[in-house]
Every structure is written in structure tokens, then in C-alpha cells.
Image (cartoon, grey):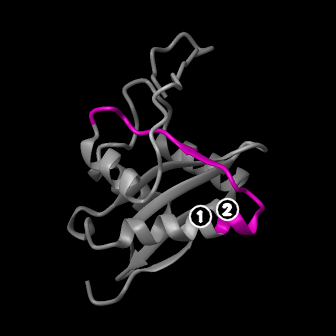
Amino acid sequence: MSADPVIRTIRSADISGVVALWEEAGMAAYELSGDAADEITSKMDRDPDLFIVAEADGGVVAVVMGTWDGHRGRIKRLAVRSDLRRSGLGRRMVEELERRFVDAGIRRIRLEVWSHNEGGLAFWEDLGYRLQPEIRYFVHNLDDSDDPC
């Protein structure tokens, strides 16, 4: 990579790069979930300033999706291109998203990490996020799917 990644708000032209990055990270879509591009477009419409990418050499090299439900901010789908992991880029992405949350008046943040994702669990703990063992996550799908998301 020739240039330091630039962190910025996502654009429509980034959708295919984000999908490719999620695919590389194994998080493009779960077995029964909808199309990843549709999810991206929906989030871009809802919380555009909280959906950021890092761009380098003309392509998306990191992405993180922030959302706001009126009560808490949520962090979703942080992914960094495999050759840039452990470079500090993931931390920079989270710091920028947290800054944007603060600018929007959002002070409380939640996120989910799959229990088998040991690297992800360690990453978030290292950033000062605390596991809440007393909270259980329930889902109820109104479309009769078994999608856990």
C-alpha cells in the first residue's frame, strides 16, 4: 500500500468494495440473511455520517457501520483487509466512529461479537469495551427464517 488510508463517510461507489471486504472477512451475509448490498444501502440512508470506510490506493481497505436507535449507538461489521490487520487501522476506524457518535450527542454504545471470535473479543476488550455477561441477546424473526442476525 503506497498511501496512508483516508477515513471518510461511505459513498455509493464504495458498495462493491465493502461487500468484497465483508466477504474476505467472512461476514458478507449469513445463510438466510438478505443481500449485503441492500443492507449497506439501507444503512447509508438511515445513518450516513456513522457509516465509514478507509480508502487506500483507490479501494476500500476497512469499514465500520455505526447506527443510532434514538437511545444508544451501535457498532456493526468492523472489517479490515487481511494484510492490514494489526496495523492500528481498526483502532483508527473505531476512534473516528466514536468521535462521530460524540459529535451527534451519542454517549452510549453497544456492539455484538460472536462468542467464537476470539480475535474480535480481544480487540474490543483492548479498546476498553466491557463484556456484559448478564445480558442475553434474543432474536425473533417475523419472516420465519432462522437467521441469527
100 left or right, relative to 90? right
Q: Residue at x 41, y 67 (%)?
A: 91
Quadrant housing the N terminus: bottom left
- At 59% from the left and 54% from the top, the residue drawn is 66
Q: Is residue 10 visible?
A: no
Disc 1 from disc 2: Cα separation? 5 Å
**Residue 84: horizontal and vertical position, in percent?**
26, 70
**Magenta span:** 100-116
**Amino acid on which the number 2 mark rests in the picture:** Phe
Q: Look at label 1 and name its amino acid.
A: Glu
Q: Quadrant of residue 17?
A: bottom left
Percent across and percent down for residue 89 are 37, 71
Q: Secondary structure at mark 2?
A: helix
Estimate the x, y position of residue 98 in percent, counting from the top left. 59, 64
- Picture layout, residue 61 above or below residue 37: below
User: Label 1 neighbourhood size at 10 Å, few (<14), some (14-19), many (20+)?
Assistant: many
Looking at the image, the residue that sits furthest to the bottom is 2
- Residues 68 and 45: in front is 68
> Pointer 1: what residue?
98
| Residue that carries the numbered disc 2 in the rendered image | 101
Above or below, 50 against 75 in this view is below
Task: Tell me, yes or no, whether the highlighted magenta stretch contains residue 109.
Answer: yes
The answer to the question of whether label 1 and label 2 lie on touching residues, with beta carbons closer than 8 A, is: yes
